[in-house]
Image (tube, rainbow, N blue to C red):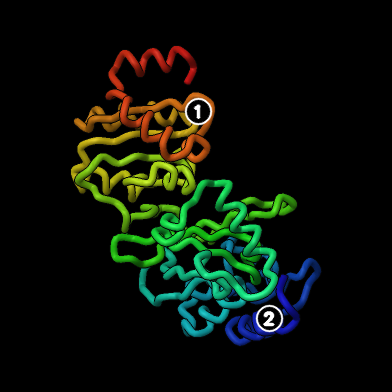
Amino acid sequence: MLSHHERQSVINILDDILGIGTSMKNDEQAHYCPFCHHHKKKLQINLKTQQWHCWVCDAKGKRIQRLLKRLQVDTRKIKKIYEIYGDDYVVYSDNTDEETVELRLPNEFKSLLKEPKGLNPPFRKVVEYAKSRNLSTEDIRKYNIGYCDGGHYSGRIIIPSYDVDNRLNYFIARSVFAEEKFKYKNPPVSKNVIMFENQINWNEPITLVEGVFDAMAVKRNAIPILGKFIPKKLNENIYKKGVKSINILLDEDAQSQALHYTMQFQNQGIDTKNIVPSEKDASDMGFSQVNKVLKHSEKTNFTDIISQKLKGL
């Protein structure tokens, strides 16, 4: 929730760009629309959700910074909006229609390798959670795993992902407190990234898994796709890099997509294994069991695919 000072700062920025607005109920501001120039204040901006919408020309968006970017305002003002609504992004000025941001870790991010002084309940809870996920000190160091004990991501374990140039391209923020309503509170940026790209050797077999903890259980050359569908950028890179062998290790409820990708890659001449988990996902199986399964699995052939489809997978 915005503090009074933060709220007033946002209003001041909007008033400076759009003219003096009118306060409405539900924490909304009404302004003259800069797109259709209607004579009444038909552009409504919600200060809580950041959503904005003109009731005349239907111009709309989900973030205030996107509105300001479309209006080509001073990037310092856009940066200020980013800082107020989470402090996770820095805007780059460009001339494309697509929003371009450089992601950075929250200001409150702390490495899990450094034990804080005094009592720190979030740190203790994150350590317990890391142990329950069988994360080792080596894993924490390799993936730069940390946590936040304050701010927007307080009480969450943070797993950063870096691209081939070691630039942050995404991060996972998973709550370690059972009473938290939302398990994940990830940055509102595109998931069209290659997770853990700086850890990948494209000349060796890659393993596609659903989540970051699954990838860390595999440990070697594993890429989390953050769901059931392979991101476009990753799909393109698989062909661009000439990947020769792929293991697909998705959860049981994602086998329809897994079979689709198995056929897709095999049709392009890539040796592909679709590994159907028995009951546990990769993170629950652990390193030893996962690698035992990978080692003893064979390339999925057409008969296997048909058999799995008939079973309803």
Is residue 54 found left or right of 28 in the rendered image? left
Residue on which disc 2 sits:
6
> Which residue is nearer to you in this view: 62 or 116?
116
Q: Quadrant of residue 1?
A: bottom right
The earlier-in-sequence mark between 2 and 1 is 2
Is residue 279 found left or right of 10 in the rendered image? left
Is residue 287 found left or right of 26 in the rendered image? left
Amino acid tagged 2: Glu
Q: Residue at x 42, y 70 (%)?
A: 102
Q: What label sits on residue 252 in the rendered view?
A: 1
| Rendering coords of residue 124 (x, y %) | 64, 61
Q: Residue at x 49, y 35 (%)?
A: 285
| Rendering coords of residue 149 (x, y %) | 64, 69
Report crowding for label 1: few under 14, some 14 to 19, many 20 or more residues within 10 A (C-alpha). some
Query: What is the C-alpha distance between the residues marked 2 and 1?
Result: 45 Å
Q: Residue at x 47, y 82 (%)?
A: 75
Whether residue 35 is visible to the viewer of this picture, yes or no, is: no
Amino acid tagged 1: Glu
Whether residue 194 is visible to the viewer of this picture, yes or no, is: yes
| Rendering coords of residue 78 (x, y %) | 52, 78
